[in-house]
Image (cartoon, grey):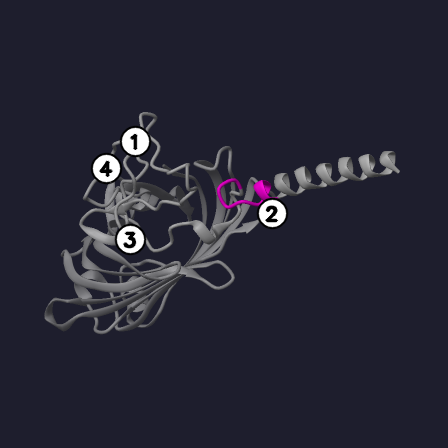
Amino acid sequence: MRTIIHALAVLALAFGMTTVHAQEATSPATNPMDHSHMDHGSTGQPPAADSGGSTHDHGTQRAVTPLDETNTGLRDPHAYSGGHELDPVRPHLADDHPIGSFLADKLEAVHSDGNTSAAYDLQAWYGWTYDRAVLKAEGSIASGTLEEARTELLWSHAIATFWDAQTGVRHDAGEGPDRKWLSFGVQGLAPYWFEIEAAGYVGEEGRTALRLHASYELLLTQKLILQPRIEANVYGKADAERGLGSGLSDVIAGLRLRYEIRREFAPYLGIEYAAKFGGTADFARAADHDPRETRAVAGFRFWF
């Protein structure tokens, strides 16, 4: 009997010690997951940093959000920045910097009916993503003489994805007196990747003009590219001094096959058909020129 009583006393003592340890393990002072004792109502400043630079009270495990001293309740933008502050001026992004480009889309020798001339079609621009200055120049030279030249200085502004509105001035030189125009139009990439230019012009003495240009690049291989292009000019009134009639004046359609040695440089061969219409064709016949001609072209295209 005494042995049984002694065994029961040992079991009771062991059970009592286990209960005490369980209560200590679940006490708020030792259980970091008990949030009932955290200070949720404090809206004051975070506790002062200790010698290690910490702003957390590890004794209570309270979460601290750095606040701007002058705007209570807002996050401090300079918190955890290592002492560095943001520049009050907005940082410059990539499209804030002006850039430029130059394209010689056509620089070629033209052969037709025993005559050889040179032709060029250049375009350069400098500016930003949405606004830029554009220079366009197109013309032909024969026997060392400038036959015709069209030069435009434009301001281009992006109005939609792939499309720019352009306004500026145009100057015509070559045979006959020079002409000056105000220019307005659009340039961009149409659906199915057609490159389009459409411009209207208002000149001196009530002259008006319309120019349309379209081209397409067909990739036969990654380096061999066939480019069809067409251009048409329309004038509102005749200009006999420059050999231009009213209405549809001329249309030039051509094919050029180029090989891109590099993307930036490509020689090409091609053929084009040029036709004059209406009063412009009459002026050409009067000057003993054929209003219809087929031309062979050879040149190179480059850009940078």
Which of the marked residues, 3 or 4, is nearer the chain's N terminus? 3
Above or below, comparing residue 178 to residue 191 in the picture? above
Q: Residue at x 28, y 64 (%)?
A: 185
At label 2, the amino acid type is Leu
Q: Mark 3 or mark 4, which is nearer to you?
A: 3
Task: Residue type at mark 4: give it.
Answer: Glu
Amino acid type for the residue under numbered disc 3: Thr
Q: Where is mark 4, residue-wise? A: 85
State if disc 1 and disc 4 touch (CB < 8 Å): no
Q: Residue at x 31, y 52 (%)?
A: 42
Query: Left or right of 201: which side holds 252?
Result: right
Measured as percent of width and height from the top left, residue 64 is found at 36, 45
| Residue 28 is inside the magenta segment | yes
Real-space Cα separation, disc 1 to disc 3, in angstroms: 25 Å
Q: Is residue 26 magenta?
A: yes
- Based on the displayed image, in which of its 4 quarters is residue 302 positioned? top left
- Label 3 sits on residue: 43
Residues tagged 3 and 4 counted as in contact (Cβ below 8 A) = no
Crowd rating for badge 3 (residues with CA inside 10 Å; few <14, some 14–19, many 20+): few
In the foreground, 79 or 236: 79
Q: Earlier in the sequence, mark 1 or mark 2?
A: 1
Q: Which residues are drawn in magenta?
A: 23-30
Q: What quarter of the picture does the C terminus occupy?
A: top left
**Closer mark to the observer between disc 2 and disc 4:** 4
Q: Is residue 161 visible?
A: yes
SS label for mark 1: loop
In space, the residues marked 3 and 2 are separated at their CA atoms by 70 Å
Q: Secondary structure at mark 4?
A: loop
Q: Which mark is drawn over residue 220?
A: 2
